[in-house]
Amino acid sequence: MGFLLASLCVVHLLLLEADGTSAETEPFYPFGLNNGDTQYDYNSYYYNYGHYFQIQPETSFPFFGGKYYLINIYMQGFLTLGQTSDYYYPIQFPSYSRNDFIAPFWTTWNNGVNGALFYREVTSGSVLQEVTSDINQYYPQLNFSAAWAFIATWNWTKYDSAAPPEATFQVVLVTDGTLSFVLMNYGNLSATSDVQVGYDTMNSTNYFSMPGSFQSNITNLSFTSNVNVKGRWVFRTDYCYNNCLFQDDFYPYGPNNGDSLIPPVNDGNSSVILLTETLQFFGTEYNKLYVNNNGFLTFGQAVSSPYSSMFRSGYDIIAPFWSNWNTTKSGVISYRQATSGSDLQQATSDINQYFPQLNFTATWVFIATWDNVAFYNMDTETSFQVVLISDGDQSFVLMNYGRISSVISSMQAGFVTADSMIYFNMMEYSSYTDLTFSSNVNVKGRWVFQTNINYEKGIAV
């Protein structure tokens, strides 16, 4: 996107009533108590560092490949989507962290005097009409119609230094359910150099750091723009090439790669899948399996429980990510098995990298992928994959993890034998939101296990 910087001129002064209501709003959208905002006062030292409040919006907000039902608003002038942040002081983008940040003006504040934060959701009325008009002015090819907006305004906050409390800025999140945008509006800004402005995604697969961040001239935001509206910056945030690279290490999947699809039935299973080669699973040989829509494999019979009861179930189970997935809402589950070609070459290379002492040559691969599946009835997207690999005698399970929604409850990942004597519970080693970044083979988002070995009791990596 080319950035059109408006020429420097006299800064627009935002006039405020006693209750914080904006008397003149350009470039701000109306805010304050009289406009239906909730007001959050800065009234104690505790609120200065790391304090935030959380809202669950009425709809999901698309943000570079993810869809979010949680917004965390921090007093320091930034938001996170989904997971909360361990960072309180401003960090530079790209941060390569595990958070999605939106930072209209992230700095260190002393908010004990003359400060308030206003916020509200909007699903109808004049503000949606105004933001619809604005987005269509900036992106006329999209024919956009806003269905939801979230507006947060930091009003007359005070820097951590002795500088006067002169900073007013606003962030607006807006979506029609598919497209999404972030608008950042600026009024008076006191001089400071310790500021990060922009956005950053998990692992920094998409980010923007405003020119002037961590420099004293960042206060020029009151005069500049990328949409030719002084004091306003606008970013489209819904689209992400290659799912933001979170699935780079997945084996190829989907109908274009020869996969069969499992019908989108809630709590459903595949029909029985007859294996072209037997799989060794801790002392038992299997020649068939079932793929469960809720994120696990069984061998003896289909199991349709949406609840993650991997242990003491009485079944041999491989569960890359067992939870209440609902492909009737969104997402696709597919599978295939291969006895020749590039899948075997990739599996052979991977296993020899992780187990170099085995001199392994794969003769059979089975791949099942849950692609952008929804959790329960929520418009969220989670992707993961399980790969079974064998040479007829030795067998392995790979679990690959892509983007994971942050609103999942009741989940299990790992494997277990029917008597629960041999098992691996990944939740003992990694939080579910961390599976995308964790590994036992030094490949981010991948866990690998050898399953043809008998253990007397238990298993550990």
Image (tube, helix red, strand yellow):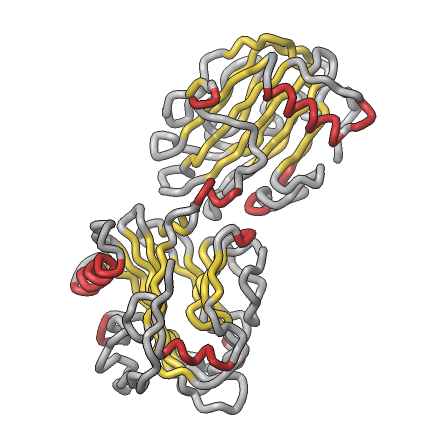
Name the quarter where the C terminus is drawn.
top right
Q: Where in the figure is residue 178, as x and y percent of width and height?
A: 31, 46
Q: Where in the figure is residue 258, as x and y percent of width and height?
A: 47, 18
Residue 24 vertical placement versus 251 (above, below): below
For image coordinates 41% across by 51% down, the residue present is 63
Residue 314 in view here:
no
Name the quarter where the N terminus is drawn.
bottom left
Residue 45 vertical placement versus 270 (above, below): below
**321 relative to 440 in the view: left or right:** left
Q: Where in the figure is residue 158, as x and y percent of width and height?
A: 46, 84
Residue 322 vertical placement versus 381 (above, below): above
Pick the residue in front: 72 or 156: 156
- Quadrant in the rendering for residue 3: bottom left
**272 relative to 40 in the view: left or right:** right
In this view, the residue farthest toward the right is: 357
Pick the residue in front: 289 or 422: 289
For image coordinates 70% across by 41% down, the residue present is 442
- Quadrant in the rendering for residue 347: top right
Pick the residue in front: 203 or 58: 203
For image coordinates 43% across by 49% down, the residue present is 64
Residue 376 in view here:
yes
**159 relative to 426 in the view: left or right:** left
Residue 396 vertical placement versus 95 (above, below): above
**447 relative to 295 in the view: left or right:** right
- Quadrant in the rendering for residue 256: top left
